């Protein structure tokens, strides 16, 4: 059942692929319809004229011949039946037929109402049978014997392989002693048929030539339109690739040239606006960078003063001491904000690059979790880790990947509301994935679409534990894209959220297809099975279940660390993972 659908789709795609093709085919189809209609009408008129002419000629010739035959019958001997038949035979086969055997045949039959005793046998030309006379013509002649009766029909001759259209003229003759007889003169229209065949051939040749001419006209007409349109499409594609100096040539003042001038005017306007936006963007980036750099010097001075005040806070009164503590904390947050603003400005200016090393991603995950041990203890969330025992080597910028994991994990701990946080590392031949799942406040679909926006917060009034700047997830998304990977999120209100980082193992082997949505079960994750497998494949993620190198069904329990399972996969709480694995490289600061 799929083949016809594919065939229909292929025909539709082929039909839509070229304007010139549609114009030519449409022109030829319309030309074919017009040619057939006009040719049929003209051929019908010609055929009708030839038949009318043949009937007129046959009627006139038959009237003259009937008079001649009647005169011959009046003058013949009336002695006996034998001489009567011999004389009638001589008249029909001699006088009537010998005049033009190729153009006229004759049949003499006794009329239906004739009751005379003398009989003349039915006479007919040698190559025609008396039965060829239609009964309708016989009946018409019986009803009106005073006038000729004419009919056009096909007649089979013994000398012809097929029936020949003929004009049959019937007339009444009176023979002495034998009474009334019907004389039928048959006029084959062979010459008219030959003329029609010749006309039909020329009509076919002329129609074919006309179709070819229409196709050529359609080609020329479509070329006059399709070529400028195709050129406009090519110029548009070049402009879409960033070649803003491309323009359409203008050679005249017709409609297409007016369109080209309008297109060029639009392109000039777009180029001018893009350059203005680029200039504004560069100024904005430079402003942010300059401000960030210039603020570092006074910030350092303020930090030094703040540290002095913070260290001496015990000598101050309670309000002053609290002010010193707040000043110290906010100065740290201000420094983080400046650092992230500088990083964002690098991404905006296209100056961000990677320092690629072959690093054990499992060790990086463990190291990041170790750095967040204090935060985990403060929030009360148990971190359940599931990573392979063997090293997971990935070509990456360790500083940036560590920053991604640190931002996402800190976000999970901050919003986990003291509930467990699951961290799963899965690997395949060409890609790896780290999934971080919390069971806290969760996200709606609208919030998930905005979670990577700069300075966006789902609930600005909510107390934050980490006091983030609002740029962490936005920078994490840019870091993932810089690696050729993906950072995705899914969640549900009250069920928590799941972030998934997908990275290629090698930078020269990119991920072929974008991973599918992050699997997010709405049911709580059982403590004896850990987080649901994400179904990592070689080119991304699928909706399938557990994999050979991913987590197995065994996982952490409600209390205490879990051991190593039979699938060489580790499921550990944060404290044990932090002490058991220290294989990651140096972690650079942001």
Image (tube, helix red, strand yellow):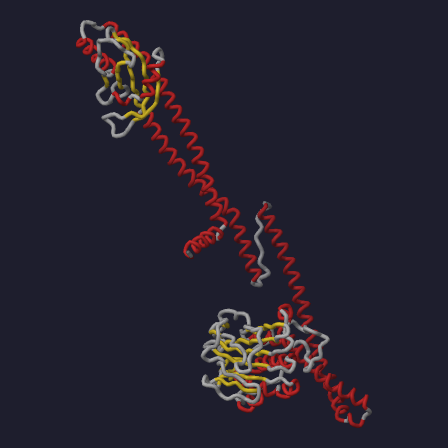
- Residue in front for this viewpoint, 552 or 577: 552
Measured as percent of width and height from the top left, residue 274 is found at: 64, 63
Residue 464 relative to residue 438: left or right? right
> In the rendered image of this protein, does residue 515 appear above or below residue 336?
above
Q: Is residue 348 visible?
A: no
- Looking at this rendering, what residue extends furthest in the bottom direction? 315
Measured as percent of width and height from the top left, residue 201 is found at: 35, 33
The image quarter in which residue 298 lies: bottom right
Residue 46 relative to residue 344: left or right? left
- Residue in front for this viewpoint, 351 or 80: 80
Quadrant containing the N terminus in the rendered view: bottom left
- Residue in front for this viewpoint, 402 or 169: 169
Q: Is residue 428 visible?
A: yes
Query: Which residue shows up at 33% across the image and 14% down it?
Result: 142
Query: Which residue shows up at 21% across the image and 21% down it?
Result: 126
Measured as percent of width and height from the top left, residue 106 is found at: 26, 17
Residue 69 relative to residue 516: left or right? left
Query: Which residue shows up at 28% across the image and 8% down it?
Result: 174
The image quarter in which residue 214 lies: top left
Query: Which residue shows up at 53% across the image and 53% down it?
Result: 231
């Amino acid at each position: 059942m799929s083949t016809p659908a594919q065939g229909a789709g292929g025909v539709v795609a082929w039909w839509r692929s070229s304007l010139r093709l549609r114009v030519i085919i449409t022109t030829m189809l319309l030309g074919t319809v017009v040619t057939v209609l006009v040719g049929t009408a003209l051929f019908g008129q010609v055929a009708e004229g030839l038949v009318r002419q043949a009937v007129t000629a046959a009627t006139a010739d038959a009237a003259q011949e009937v008079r001649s035959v009647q005169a011959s019958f009046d003058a013949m001997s009336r002695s006996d039946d034998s001489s009567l038949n011999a004389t009638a035979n001589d008249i029909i086969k001699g006088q009537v037929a010998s005049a033009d055997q190729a153009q006229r045949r004759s049949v003499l039959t006794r009329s239906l109402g004739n009751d005379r005793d003398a009989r003349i046998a039915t006479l007919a030309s040698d190559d025609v049978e008396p039965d060829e006379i239609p009964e309708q013509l016989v009946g018409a002649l019986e009803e009106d014997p005073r006038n000729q009766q004419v009919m056009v029909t096909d007649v089979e001759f013994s000398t012809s392989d097929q029936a020949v259209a003929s004009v049959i003229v019937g007339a009444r003759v009176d023979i002495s002693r034998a009474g009334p007889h019907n004389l039928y003169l048959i006029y084959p229209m062979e010459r008219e048929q030959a003329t029609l065949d010749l006309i039909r051939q020329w009509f076919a040749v002329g129609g074919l030539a006309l179709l070819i001419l229409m196709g050529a006209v359609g080609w020329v007409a479509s070329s006059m339109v399709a070529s400028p349109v195709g050129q406009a499409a090519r110029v548009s594609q070049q402009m879409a690739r960033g070649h803003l100096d491309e323009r359409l040539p203008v050679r005249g003042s017709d409609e297409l040239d007016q369109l080209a001038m309008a297109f060029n005017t639009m392109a000039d306007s777009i180029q001018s606006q893009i350059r203005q936006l680029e200039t504004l963007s560069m100024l904005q980036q430079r402003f942010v960078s300059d401000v960030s750099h210039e603020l570092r010097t006074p910030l350092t001075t303020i930090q030094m003063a703040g540290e002095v005040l913070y260290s001496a806070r015990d000598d101050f009164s309670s309000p002053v001491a609290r002010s010193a503590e707040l000043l110290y904390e906010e100065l740290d947050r201000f420094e983080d904000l400046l650092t992230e603003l500088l990083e964002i400005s690098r991404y905006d200016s296209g100056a961000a690059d990677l320092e690629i090393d072959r690093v054990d991603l499992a060790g990086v995950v463990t190291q990041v979790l170790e750095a967040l041990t204090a935060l985990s203890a403060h929030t009360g969330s148990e971190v359940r880790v599931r990573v392979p025992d063997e090293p997971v080597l990935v070509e990456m910028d360790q500083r940036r990947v560590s920053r991604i994991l640190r931002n996402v994990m800190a976000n999970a701990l901050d919003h986990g509301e003291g509930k467990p946080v699951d961290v799963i590392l899965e690997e395949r031949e060409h890609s790896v994935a780290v999934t971080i799942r919390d069971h806290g406040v969760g996200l709606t679909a609208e919030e998930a679409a905005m979670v990577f926006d700069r300075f966006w917060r789902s609930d600005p009034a909510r107390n934050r534990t980490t006091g983030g700047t609002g740029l962490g997830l936005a920078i994490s998304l840019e870091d993932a894209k810089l690696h050729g990977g993906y950072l995705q999120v899914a969640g549900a209100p009250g069920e928590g959220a799941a972030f998934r980082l997908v990275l290629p193992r090698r930078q020269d082997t990119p991920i072929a297809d974008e991973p599918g949505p992050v699997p997010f079960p709405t049911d709580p994750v059982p403590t004896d099975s850990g987080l649901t497998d994400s179904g990592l494949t070689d080119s991304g993620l699928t909706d399938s279940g557990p994999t050979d190198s991913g987590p197995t069904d065994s996982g952490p329990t409600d209390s205490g660390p879990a051991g190593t399972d039979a699938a060489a996969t580790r499921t550990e709480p944060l404290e044990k993972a932090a002490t058991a694995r220290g294989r990651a490289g140096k972690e650079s600061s942001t």
